[in-house]
Image (cartoon, coloured by chain):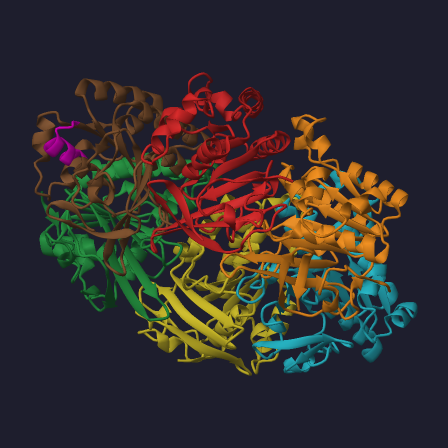
Chain colours: A orange, B red, C brown, D green, E yellow, F cyan
């Protein structure tokens, strides 16, 4: 079994194998402002720049331009990776608003379409890493909870059959979600990573809540977001 | 990337760039009486009087007359800004009650209409700042939760495409909302600002919970509302 | 801007202007037995006897006779004010039970009817103060939550257009409601006053949670109900 | 105004007038085993034996035989009061099970029938006191929450028009209900009395949460159930 | 009035009369693994072996064989009581699965059938004690909450008319249920007994929460399950 | 009565009989990452390798390949057991996604099909141990809660009639579920085992919450997951 290295400072060392099993689909849970998108982009950037693994960032919320802008303050050369096609920001936001009407929206996002587009792009790009930002859109734009769950299953199963290692970002509604409370979909994923920002103590913390197939350190760890992105103080 | 300065005493210094990215849509969350409307108007007033940036205050709750009256005790010359068209208070309250019947209300506010009116006014007024007061009306007047969410998406996407920096005010149902609990729509915004009034400790507090594209200070800060409006004690 | 004085002992001094803006609609929130009705009647009684401002008490729960009886133990001469038409107790209870059948009740109280009757009475009586007792009836007798909200909006907008200063009483379901938790309709009002009775500490407390257009003291204050009614120990 | 004396040891002295206004409808809230039924029967027994006021116990749960048996361990001569028609135990349980089918039950208990039977019996018996045991049946046997509320309103209004002082018993779902949390129907009643049994401290406590038209002591008081029934340790 | 003795070590002495009124229907509430079934079988076994009172165990969950097996580790001779027909384990599980289809299950268990079978068996067996294991099945197998409640009423009323003393077992969803929180059906029963297992303190506790017609000790008591079954340490 | 030995280090000794009754169906409850799947596979692996009892792992979530991979870091020779048909990983995942359309999924998984396949495989394989991973899928893929419950009953009853000892894994939504709170289906099982991971204290804990027919140690116990799998520190 091979293990993926995220390249995020201080994170890979939390696993017995200095990384977690390649091919895993991992849920990244955290409230607003906890750094989920930065975590995802840093994972792709390090994959492309350090390990030569191309990646795809699927944005369901923001335009690719904004995604790029949001990390422009870091000392990364993300633009170069994009220009060299080692990182692709795949825009999955547009059809939601511009090209389909309300009834189509009510029926939820076209997950099968997304899956087939993503599959194609993975192949053409030989991508090894994928980030999906975010699950929250899926639930928010879907009037039918059961349909949302069905789509989640399709997505999870599809991801597990692609030859990529995926982070799926999801916005938590409370600080407890990911440590003592869990959304119902966690069982669909091979791993769960939890991010937290405590406004009172002014601390950011991260924990590996679950990771199949590899031993990992228990407990939560402080991290900071500085000029190079996320850095874990293990 | 350019950064907006709110001009609110002690607030801009909480960001590494002395402000946050221009073009952001920021959610301002707080319970009743926490000062959301004052924060919004002060942002417009300072923008117009200090930085020469025209602004629009979209009121979905109160008549423009009441909006103006509510800040009349401060030592601002808001009237002059209005007379000079540097600040416009756009009345989006009337149709809700006067011109449409109950079934139309049941179908919710006409968000597309609001968006097109707002777009037009931004252009004609060369506005750079917008405040929407408030999201609460949208949910309160809408029998269909999914429809409310669809409208929120339309609004959020539209705002992100206009060349303005926006504050969207939203009334929180508990003091925790914005720090340890979050409404489902937060992921639609680039930033989240939290206002709180603790009746027991007699303190007002503010925190930046999330702001994409710029480093900011963590933690909560006391603030007061005095004769000049909001002043943060950082 | 003019400011209303409630005449309630120790209350008006909590505002920078010794009162709050005339024309405001203020929500008075408190659990059972916290003194909401006494607060409302005392506001009318003081208005009529000290400031010469006629008032209307709209009772949706109890018969006018019981309303009067409930404050008979205080050293007020309420009867005289009623006889001189300076205070009117408007009975909005009867139609609910006696003259309409269950299906009509299911459709909720006739808010438009109430508003038109109230408007007429305000004009004929030159009333400056109104108390509505209580919002709880509106929700309790209405099977359709959205319809209740629509009626609340109609009522709130109508009150804001009448030339009166209004207290709207509402029974809270927990002690927290009004300080750390809020009902969804608070944003419709210019102010929120909170009343509390703590059976353990045997204390009654009051707080101004929100008041637009005037500075007020933060914090909660003890009060007693003695032979003259409510008296705040500021 | 006249004041009713319950005759329950140590209870009447908690009111400024040694009792509360005659004609009141009072809600008695408490969890299972807190002594609500004993409180109700003792109120009737004392009324009949000490003050010559006939009473009616409306039982919606148990057979009259069981109601009587439940207080047989006390040193009261309840049987004599029943034989002399000073206390009547009115059986409102039978139709619920025996004479009507499921669809009728689904439509809820026949409250109008109950009200007319009760009115007749009050007149024929010259009753001054009524106990209704209990509201819980009304909600439990009713599939339609709105219908339950409508019936509650009918009952409350009817009671307020009869020339009797009534206790309405209601089973609380938690120990907090009646002190810090309240059911939505409390506003329909003139008073709220709260009973509690704390299994940990092995204490029974009582409090007057609300009573219109009379001053009362705040705070909670221990009570015991001994051979003479309820006795409050004020 | 006669009083039933459960024969459970240390339990009967918690009542002033060394037992509670014969003919009572008592709810036994406790989470999984708290010993409800053992309490029920021990009550029947002691009734049959010590007091010569035949009993019926109505099992809605498990096969009679498993019911018997579950207490096989205790030093009881339950088999002999069954062979002598002093204890009957009545199987009410089979029809639920084997002989009826899903739509019939959706319509809920045939409570009238159960009642008539039970009545017949009580008569033929001259049973004085009944245990129903458990209410949880009734709610779990019923899609319609109102129908479940109607059935509960039928069952409770029927039990109160049979000349037996009954324990009705019910699985609680939290440790609090039975002490500070209560299910809505408690008012249907003459008594409530609460069982608890605290995994942290490694203690089992029992309390009498309610018992009509007899004084009982308040407070909770430790108990153990040893080779003779349940033994209370009063 | 015979007793099953799980073979999990330090676990069997928690029971008076060094194991629990053969033929039991036991619910294993725990949040994500608590080790439920490892517990299940270790139970099968030890059964096959130490006690010569063949076993079946029914996977409703993951492909058999991933199931095997997830425990590949332990020093077990699981592959040999599979090759020798002493352990079978039965794939119950495929039909959910590949062969049936959305409407069929809406109707839920084909539980009768699963039961008949499992029965057949138990017979052909002479299996004595079964693990079902997991109940969570059943609820997640089913739009109709009542239908989920009906299927759970069918499954539980079927398992109790097969001559096997079964572990049914279920993902808990909070850390409390299994100790102080319980899902409604626990009463269907003979036993409940609870697994917990506390990210703060960095501890894993296990408890036997319920086990019919055998005495067991109360309390929670620390455990670790090391190179040999789960090891309890009793």
Task: Give residue D160's quadrant in the image.
Answer: top left
Q: Residue at x 55, y 44 (%)?
A: B19
Q: Residue at x 59, y 31 (%)?
A: B159
When the figure is inspected, residue F128 is found, relative to residue D113, above or below; the finding is below
Q: Is residue C85 left or right of residue B6?
A: left
Q: Which residues are magenta?
A: C44-54
Q: Note whether residue B34 is visible.
A: no
Of E108 and B219, which appears nearest the observer?
B219
Of B232 and C161, which appears nearest the observer?
B232
Q: State the residue lying farthest toward the right.
A: F83
Main SS of the magenta part reads helix
Residue B22: x percent and y percent? 59, 37
Residue C85: x percent and y percent? 12, 25
Residue D96: x percent and y percent? 40, 43
Q: Residue at x 9, y 27 (%)?
A: C83
Q: Note whether residue D17 is visible.
A: yes
Q: Is residue C83 left or right of residue C214?
A: left
Q: Which quarter of the rendered picture does the N terminus of chain C lie within?
A: top left
Residue E208: x percent and y percent? 39, 68
């Amino acid at each position: 079994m091979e293990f993926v290295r995220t390249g995020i400072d201080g994170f890979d060392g939390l696993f017995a194998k200095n990384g977690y099993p390649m091919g895993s689909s991992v849920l990244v849970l955290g409230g607003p402002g906890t750094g989920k998108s930065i975590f995802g982009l840093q994972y792709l950037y390090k994959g492309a720049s350090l390990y030569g693994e191309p990646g795809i960032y699927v944005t369901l919320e923001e335009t690719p331009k904004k995604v790029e802008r949001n990390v422009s303050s870091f000392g990364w050369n993300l633009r170069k990776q994009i220009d060299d096609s080692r990182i692709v920001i795949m825009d999955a936001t547009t059809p939601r608003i511009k090209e389909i009407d309300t009834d189509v929206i009510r029926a939820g996002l076209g997950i099968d379409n997304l899956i087939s587009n993503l599959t194609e792009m993975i192949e053409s790009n030989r991508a090894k890493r994928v980030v999906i930002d975010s699950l929250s859109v899926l639930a928010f734009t879907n009037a039918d909870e059961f349909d949302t769950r069905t789509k989640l299953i399709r997505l999870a199963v599809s991801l597990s059959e692609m030859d990529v290692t995926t982070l799926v970002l999801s916005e938590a509604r409370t600080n407890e979600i990911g440590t003592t409370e869990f959304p119902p979909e966690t069982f669909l994923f091979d791993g769960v990573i939890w991010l937290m920002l405590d406004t009172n103590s002014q601390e950011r913390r991260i924990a590996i809540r679950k990771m199949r197939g590899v031993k990992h350190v228990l407990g939560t760890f402080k991290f900071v977001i500085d000029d190079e992105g996320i850095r874990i103080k293990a």
